[in-house]
Structures are given as structure tokens and as C-alpha cells.
Image: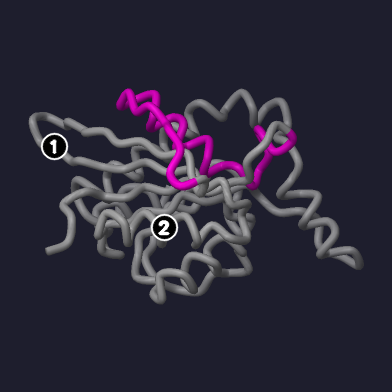
């Protein structure tokens, strides 16, 4: 029987130089959840910062693991699949939080399945889990300018920081992301989509 625990994985790149960059939105939402639910991180096999907690919304309880893969974005699947195998967590109890350039800053989209959309972290998780049937909370970062140097622009963009006005809005955006994760776990994917996707 699969575990009753949920696994919430926020994607990013470890290390000082990546802190606060667009590609680390997942880490930032994971940190917001850790703060909200008093989760202490420790090491899981060198693959992830990892902790567990219990959410309590109006007397309803959800047990969850919270992970920030330390494998760098492109190998995020190694950490997610290791934890889900170790604790026997089914894909329908996995929520992955990641940045999404195809959404404007502050937009959130909740989905399950679908293509990786050029996101290497998601591609890695799909491959490692052998399925894409897990929930994703996509945090909009807006897009780099398209053009002759599209790939280079994209790399610099996702590894770049936020504008001052965006940084100011960040606490609210991260709180919304944390709310979206909680809604998936407590009320299901459809409810989360209704609440967040149209905003």
C-alpha cells in the first residue's frame, strides 16, 4: 500500500550564486512552505534538502515531505524518484513546483501530465519516475526576449534575478504558490486549477 504522505518538491539549483534567480522559484516556494509549517530540512542521501511536516487546515490534516533537490535542475528526477521510491509515494501524491517562462510574472498554473515544455527539471522527473502523472505548480517568471540569441538569452534569463518591483511582489507570489500546493493536497487538482489558473 502506497504511503499516505505527499511529496512536495520545489525545483532549483543549489548554491549561493543561484539564490533568488528565476530558475529557483521552486526552492523559494518550498522555503515558504517550510516556514509556514515549521519544516526543518536535513540531507537525504546527498540528493536533496529534505524535511517532513503536517499541514492542518480547519482540523483536516495532511502529512507531507518537502524536498529541494541538490542535484542541479537537469537531474532533479534523481532526487524525486529516490525519495518517492524510498517512502513509497505514488505519483498522484507528488507535487512539483517550478518556474515557467511561458507564464507572466505572478501567474500560477496548476496541472498534471502534459509536456515538459522545455523545462529540464520536469523532463528529468518524467524520465526518472517513468510517468508525468504528478501535479505541477507552475510559477510564472515571464520570458526573455526572443531573437537571434534565443538560447543564450533564455539561459541568462532563468539564471537572472528579479526586477525591484517584482522582488517587492515576491512574498505575495510565493504565498500564492504555497496556497496552490496546499489546495492540490487538500482539495484536489481540479479545485486548485479553478482557484489559480484563471487569475
Q: Which quadrant of the figure has residue 21?
A: top right
Tell me the residue at 19%/45% (across/down): 186
Residue with the most extreme front position:
45
Q: Which quadrant of the figure has residue 105?
A: top right
Residue nearest the observer in this picture, 35 or 46? 46
Tell me the residue at 39%/29% (across/down): 34
Q: Is 44 covered by the magenta stretch?
A: yes
Residue with the most extreme right position:
148
- Mark 2 neighbour density, 10 Å: few (under 14) some (14–19) many (20 or more): many
**68 left or right, relative to 194:** right
For disc 2, the marked residue is 136
For disc 1, the marked residue is 61
Tell me the residue at 42%/54% (across/down): 96
Rendering coords of residue 5 (x, y %): 21, 48
Tell me the residue at 61%/59% (across/down): 102
| Callout in the foreground (2, 1) | 1
Quick one: quadrant of the N terminus? bottom left
Q: Establish if 108 lies above or below 149.
A: above
- Mark 1 neighbour density, 10 Å: few (under 14) some (14–19) many (20 or more): few
Stretch of the chain drawn in magenta: 17-45
Amino acid at each position: 500500500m502506497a504511503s499516505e504522505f505527499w511529496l512536495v518538491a520545489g525545483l532549483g539549483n543549489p548554491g549561493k550564486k543561484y539564490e533568488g534567480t528565476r530558475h529557483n522559484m521552486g526552492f523559494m516556494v518550498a522555503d515558504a512552505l517550510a516556514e509556514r509549517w515549521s519544516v526543518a530540512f536535513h540531507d537525504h542521501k546527498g540528493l536533496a534538502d529534505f524535511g517532513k511536516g503536517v499541514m492542518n487546515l480547519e482540523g483536516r490534516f495532511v502529512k507531507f515531505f518537502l524536498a529541494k533537490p541538490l542535484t542541479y535542475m537537469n537531474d532533479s528526477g534523481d532526487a524525486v524518484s529516490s525519495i518517492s521510491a524510498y517512502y513509497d509515494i505514488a505519483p498522484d501524491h507528488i507535487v512539483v513546483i517550478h518556474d515557467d517562462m511561458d507564464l507572466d510574472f505572478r501567474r500560477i498554473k496548476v496541472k498534471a501530465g502534459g509536456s515538459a515544455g522545455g523545462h529540464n527539471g520536469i523532463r528529468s522527473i518524467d524520465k526518472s519516475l517513468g510517468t508525468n502523472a504528478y501535479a505541477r505548480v507552475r510559477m510564472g517568471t515571464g520570458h526573455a526576449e526572443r531573437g537571434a540569441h534565443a538560447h543564450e538569452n533564455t539561459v541568462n534569463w532563468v539564471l537572472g534575478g528579479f526586477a525591484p518591483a517584482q522582488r517587492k511582489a515576491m512574498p505575495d507570489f510565493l504565498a500564492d504558490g504555497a496556497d496552490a500546493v496546499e489546495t492540490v493536497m487538500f482539495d484536489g487538482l481540479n479545485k486548485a486549477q479553478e482557484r489559480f489558473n484563471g487569475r
